[in-house]
Amino acid sequence: MSVVAAYLYRNGRRAAPVSIDAPPVLADDKSEFIWIGLFEPSEGELRTLQQRFVLHPLAVEDALKAHQRPKIEVYGDQLFVVARTAYLVGEAKRIAYGETAIFIGENHLISVRHGSARAHTELRSQLEAAPSQLCHGVDYVLHAILDFVVDGYMPIVDEVEEEVLAMEHRALDAFLTRDDVTRLFTLRRDLTRFERILGPMAELCSKLVHFDLPCLDVEARPYFRDVLDHVRRIENRIGGLRDVLTFVFEASTLLEQQRQGAITRQLAAWAAILAVPTAIAGIYGMNFEHMPELKTRYGYFIVVAIIALLCSVLFVRFKRARWL
């Protein structure tokens, strides 16, 4: 059974458990509602809920497929909201995604989770501990779920930020290894995909703030505006991290070119210094019979002294030019 929790709430307090097969008849009062939480339900379970709560078939199909972008749909007097959850997986700390579909009616809220690592058990306990908020109805529960999903993004951003800053430090101290470069591009790819999730999430929250929607009171809009602010703040941080990754790669490339240029200059300087004795020795190594100074008594020492002098002059010049 995929039903994690199913309860009737009255005046902000849990009143009784409910069955998805036969939910109770509710009073026409927002303070009395049903909240059902499911995790990766079967098609039969969703079809049962569709019949009991008159859910729109297109919304049920979307909840079954679980490959939707964040969105909000209006079906008569009901709402269908899709939010994307995110979490880190594996030693490589890749960003993986889940999905939470939410059916909202005047007196019911059904949350369907797919692939999410964070259950709503803790969230439900927090809301039940504050009946003054829970008594206002399903729109405040919707806000709590969206806020819970968006808050789950923050540890991911913090983790990635720490890794990016460490990579920036390594890039300024030494060459990036092939593994570092591979990880850099992997992070850029993950952050780009994350941005594609945050954009629709911000659009979803913006609609909840600015549009007149069924099941949502005007008094709940400031709460959704707070969620929207969180999403935009995370968007800004993700954009900043992508910029830092671009800087890390460009700085690493420039530093590598600078180091290669310094090595090239050193090699060129030593090649110029060694060219002097090579040229002089090459001339006297041609083995012609009639060459000047071949029989000079101190010719060898003079040539060695000239070589040493010229090499010393070149060394001093290159040293002053910071080529050595």
Image: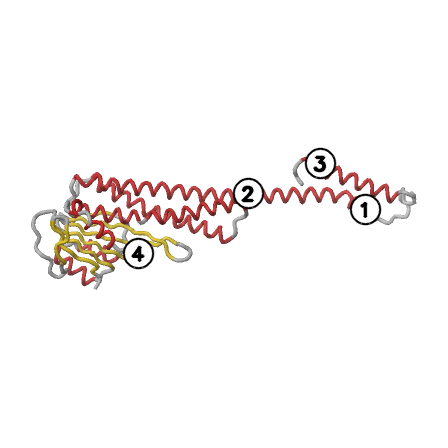
Q: Judging from the image, what secondary structure is the residue with disc 3 in?
A: helix
Q: Estimate the x, y position of residue 122 in percent, counting from the top left.
A: 25, 53
**Proximity of marks 1 and 3: CB atoms separated by less than 8 Å:** no
**Towards the viewer: 136 or 260:** 136
**Proximity of marks 4 and 2: CB atoms separated by less than 8 Å:** no
Q: Estimate the x, y position of residue 240 in percent, counting from the top left.
A: 40, 41
Residue that label 3 marks: 317
Residue that label 2 marks: 255
Q: Crowding near pointer 2: few (<14 within 10 Å), some, many (20+)?
A: some
Q: Which of marks 4 and 2 is in front?
A: 4
Q: Which of marks 1 and 3 is in front?
A: 3
Residue that label 4 marks: 117
- Amino acid bearing label 1: Ala
Mark 4 or 2, nearer chain start: 4
Mark 1 or 2, nearer chain start: 2
**Which label number is shown at residue 281?**
1
Mark 2 or 3, nearer chain start: 2
- Which part of the image, by quadrant, shows the C terminus? top right
Q: Judging from the image, what secondary structure is the residue with disc 4 in?
A: loop
